[in-house]
Amino acid sequence: QIKPVTAQFSFSNYSPSERMKASFMEFERKYGGKVFIIFSMDDKITNEEILLEIEKEINRLRKNINNQ
């Protein structure tokens, strides 16, 4: 998911709602992959550290596919 950053937004206070958490868990159960939240401001990713986590998850999923 991509979330736009607003002037009132604070990364440290962001917490997905219970509905979103349930949706993420359902996605993970159904598809076996994680859900990531990317924050953007002025069309730029503000939490760039998430990109490494996404890359690791893609590699994990590829490994699982290749081992089947």
Image (cartoon, rainbow, N blue to C red):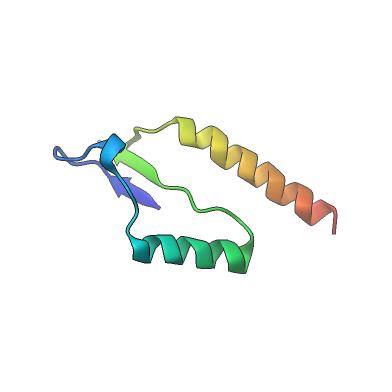
In the rendered image, which quarter is residue 54 located in? top right
Q: Position of residue 20 (x, y in %)?
A: 38, 62
The one of 8 and 19 positioned closer to us in this rendering: 19
- Tell me, yes or no, if residue 43 can be seen here: no
Q: Position of residue 10 (x, y in %)?
A: 23, 37
In the rendered image, which quarter is residue 17 located in? bottom left
Give the farthest residue toward the left. Answer: 8
Tell me if residue 66 comes above or below residue 5 in the rendering: below
The one of 17 and 56 positioned closer to us in this rendering: 17
Q: Position of residue 56 (x, y in %)?
A: 63, 39
Quadrant where the C terminus sits is: bottom right
Q: Position of residue 26 (x, y in %)?
A: 52, 68
Tell me if residue 35 comes above or below residue 59 in the rendering: below
- In the displayed structure image, the side of residue 59 where residue 43 appears, left or right: left
Residue at screen point 18% across, 41% down? 6
- In the displayed structure image, the side of residue 6 where residue 12 appears, left or right: right
- In the displayed structure image, the side of residue 8 where residue 10 appears, left or right: right
In the rendered image, which quarter is residue 43 located in? top left
- In the displayed structure image, the side of residue 32 where residue 51 appears, left or right: left
- Tell me, yes or no, if residue 24 can be seen here: yes
